[in-house]
Image (tube, coloured by chain):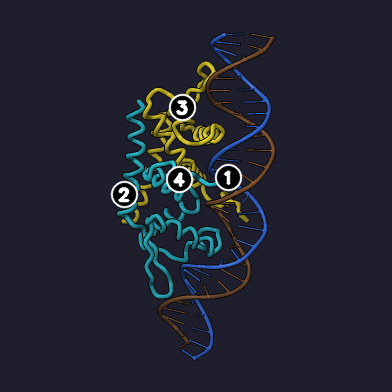
Chain colours: A cyan, B yellow, C blue, D brown
Amino acid sequence: MGVTKRQIFTERQNDLARFFKVLGHPARVTILQYISNKNACICNDLVSEIGLAQATISQHLKELKSIGLLKGEVEGKSMCYCLNVEKWTEIQNELNVFFNTAKSNCC
Amino acid sequence: MGVTKRQIFTERQNDLARFFKVLGHPARVTILQYISNKNACICNDLVSEIGLAQATISQHLKELKSIGLLKGEVEGKSMCYCLNVEKWTEIQNELNVFFNTAKSNCC
DNA sequence: TTTTAATATTGCAATATTACGATAATAAAA
DNA sequence: TTTTATTATCGTAATATTGCAATATTAAAA
């Protein structure tokens, strides 16, 4: 056992769950807050800002990139990460549709 | 290793992540959709509707209850689950604040 | 070219999650 | 009281996630 049975759900259900799941870690929430706060994009400051090892931060950034929430660009010898605002808005809208649909059906 | 370091994050960051995490499974997304669709509250239909064992569904319901998204009431020999609309709205608002704050800081 | 700085990847250990069968608990029905 | 139906909990196996040290990669600087 132990395998999530994705095949019994719709693509939309799986996609929604995937978005929620990636956002479902305090380090990733914090990374997103930090990057958006700095306006300018951020790279390794996260390591000193958040108390996690460089390898760990890098993994979390990878997850956030995997759903398109972050864009990373090479900037000299470091990486410049910034919010992908289009995707950000798209996901926010998706989640609101999910919430509003449920609410309107229910009550 | 393997333990999420919650102590290095704020309560709000942990709370947000917790909401996202609970919603981050396709079975739980599906359960919420199903319950809200039926308007009337639902209990064991979920087991036949979704292709998961009764014990598994029960665990997922427990998770959803743990963040207050569902209310469960005894109804004869079965349980009647329904959306906790106040909590639903509250969480939706929290998530929107998170999304909007990031967006307005960033761009 | 060699060094340095920043980031990514690999490999591993610890922990958490997912799922299910078996069983317990609960309440109505017989 | 006994049976039946429904839901919860326990125990366990499989898988996934988290975190870090060590190492690789990459590009500027010396």
The numbered mark, 1 or 4, whose residue comes first in the sequence reads: 1
Nearest-to-viewer mark from 4 and 2: 4
Q: Which residue is mark 4?
A: A6
Instruction: Give the residue number, with chain letter if any, for mark 3.
Output: B45
Answer yes or no: is residue B64 visible: yes
Q: Which residue is mark 1?
A: A1
Picture quadrant of residue A41: bottom left
Q: Identify which amino acid the numbered label 2 is placed on.
A: Glu
Q: Nearer the viewer, residue B90 or B25?
A: B25
Q: Is residue A8 left or right of residue C30?
A: left
In the figure, residue A62 lies in which quadrant?
Answer: bottom left
Residue type indicated by callout 1: Met
Seen at 47% across and 36% down, the residue is B51
Q: Residue at x 56, y 49 (%)?
A: B6
Residue ID at (63%, 56%): B1
Label 1 crowd (10 A; few <14 / some 14-19 / many >=20): few
Q: Are marks 1 and 3 on the same chain?
A: no
Find the distance from the CA under tag 1 to the CA under tag 3. 23 Å
D7 above or below A80? Answer: above
Q: Kindly identify which numbered label has been placed on residue A90.
A: 2
Label 1 residue SS: loop
Residue type beneath disc 3: Asp
Where residue C15 sits: x, y (%)? 63, 49
